[in-house]
């Protein structure tokens, strides 16, 4: 059975990679206007993380493709391979 999560419940959740790097906190999402599907997670990056500093951070935000999301529970877990 599919579990639905209200986007409001995701705001502020920590986003981590599957191998333990802290990317930052979830702040917003980009949704396709044509089909309503979630395309991208918008994250307030953890500026203290050396891993985050290697990624493409634009205007103070980090964009993570939704296809990278592996799990959502206490944390949002993303696959590191799709980020670099």
Image (cartoon, rainbow, N blue to C red):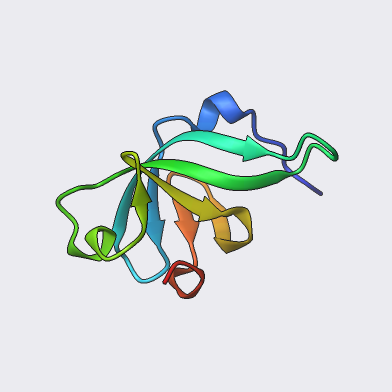
- Near-viewer residue (44 or 70): 44
Please give left or right for residue 31 compared with residue 76 in the image.
right
**Residue at the image point whose x is 56% and y is 62% from the top:** 68
- Near-viewer residue (28 or 70): 28
Q: Could you tell me how many numbered marks the image carries?
A: 0
Residue at the far top: name it.
8
Residue at the far right: name it.
35
Q: Quadrant of residue 3?
A: top right
| Residue 76 pos. (x, y %) | 47, 49
| Residue 80 pos. (x, y %) | 43, 70
**Residue at the image point whose x is 23% and y is 59% from the top:** 53
In the rendered image, the vertical position of residue 52 relative to residue 24, given as above or below = below
Please give left or right for residue 18 compared with residue 3 in the image.
left
Residue at the far front: name it.
59
Where the C terminus falls, by quadrant?
bottom left
Residue at the far bottom: name it.
81
**Residue at the image point whose x is 47% and y is 41% from the top:** 42
| Residue 60 pos. (x, y %) | 31, 39
**Residue at the image point whose x is 47% and y is 57% from the top:** 77
Q: Quadrant of residue 31?
A: top right
- Near-viewer residue (15 or 5): 15
In the rendered image, the vertical position of residue 28 relative to residue 47, given as above or below = above
């Amino acid at each position: 059975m599919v579990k639905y999560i209200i986007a409001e419940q995701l705001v502020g959740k920590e986003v981590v990679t599957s191998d333990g790097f802290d990317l930052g906190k979830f702040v917003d999402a980009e949704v396709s206007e044509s089909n309503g599907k979630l395309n991208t997670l918008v994250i307030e990056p953890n500026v203290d993380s050396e891993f985050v500093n290697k990624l493409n951070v634009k205007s103070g935000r980090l964009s993570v493709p939704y296809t990278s999301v592996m799990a959502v529970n206490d944390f949002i877990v993303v696959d590191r391979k799709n980020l670099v």
